[in-house]
Amino acid sequence: MSDGGRFPTYFLPHGGGPCFFMDPPPGGPGTWDRMADFLRSIPADLVETPRAILIVTGHWETEGLAVTAGAHPALIFDYYGFPESTYRLTYPAPGAPELAAQVAAMLSAAGFPTREDPERGFDHGMFIPLKVAFPEAAIPVVELSVRRDLDPAAHIEIGRALAPLRDEGILILATGMSYHNLRGFFTTDPRAGAASEAFDAWLTKAVCQDSAAREAALIGWEGAPAARACHPQEEHLIPLMVAAGAAGADAAIHAYADVVLGKRLSGFRFG
């Protein structure tokens, strides 16, 4: 935790499908090793084990907001074309219905009506990175959707409404990818790599500045160099806005930097 017993919050890359659990992985041996090492480093970065995890991923878009409210959510294998073994992965983390109700109440009070969904399972934006970072699957988890409108300012405010949870033993994680153009990932066209470099340089500078400037920059992310070349659809970037909002005035650090399949990727810690 940071000063005052507050947990940090993170924007984490979740990789490409079940990439960490394939042999060989997409892109060949070693491609995802540094990302996996970063994910594995998260528990050691915390002074104590979280009471629960609240995770927001770009793999669940809803009208308004929703939270998983089941006691034992199943897994949703929302990736396609991978080896059969990757559809037998397990991650039996318990849900946290009481936390789900608390999150829904906090967000609703802040003007973001939020429904509790007792049937929704955990998608791979949750269970793939957490299976690497917290393999014991012992920490209760609640997943939060992103709004279908993908409004960056609204998602910063959503994070701001959730910030008090950081003082209550709750680890807030946002997972996505700082570069998410699937066609671009698997091309050898050097323009795709150059676009990722330009956007990543902007994103790192935008995130690692004072909070007011950070939020203004993130709200205007579409004006960044190569923004739409890197995010034709921004659902994998929007979780970052929630993490930034939950950070409040806390400083950010560039916690993960790598080049994967020729594309620059980043992850951030706040607080």
Image: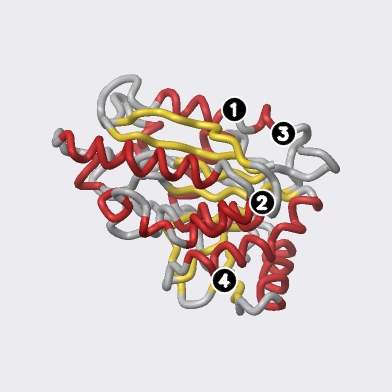
Residue located at (25% from left, 36% from top): 194
At numbered mark 1, what does the secondary structure look like: helix, strand or loop?
A: helix
Among numbered discs 1 and 2, the one appearing first in the sequence: 1
Secondary structure under tag 2 reads helix
For discs 2 and 3, the disc positioned in front in the rendered view: 2
In 3D space, how far apart are the residues under numbered discs 1 and 4 (Cα atoms)? 31 Å
Q: Nearer the viewer, residue 122 or 190?
A: 190
Check disc 1 and report the residue beneath it.
Answer: 41
Q: Quadrant of the N terminus?
A: top right
- Ranked by sequence position, the earlier of labels 3 and 4 is 3
User: How far, Cα to Cα, is label 3 from label 4?
Assistant: 29 Å
Q: What mark, if any, has residue 247 been given in the picture?
A: 2
Cα separation, mark 3 vs mark 1, equals 9 Å
* Residue 100 seen in the figure: yes
Looking at the image, residue 211 sits to the left or right of residue 195; the answer is: right
Estimate how packed mark 1 is, as few (under 14), some (14 to 19) or many (20 or more) residues with alpha carbons within 10 Å.
some
Q: Earlier in the sequence, mark 1 or mark 4?
A: 1
Residue type beneath disc 1: Ser
Q: Which mark is residue 117?
A: 4
Residues at badges 3 and 4 in contact (C-beta under 8 Å)?
A: no
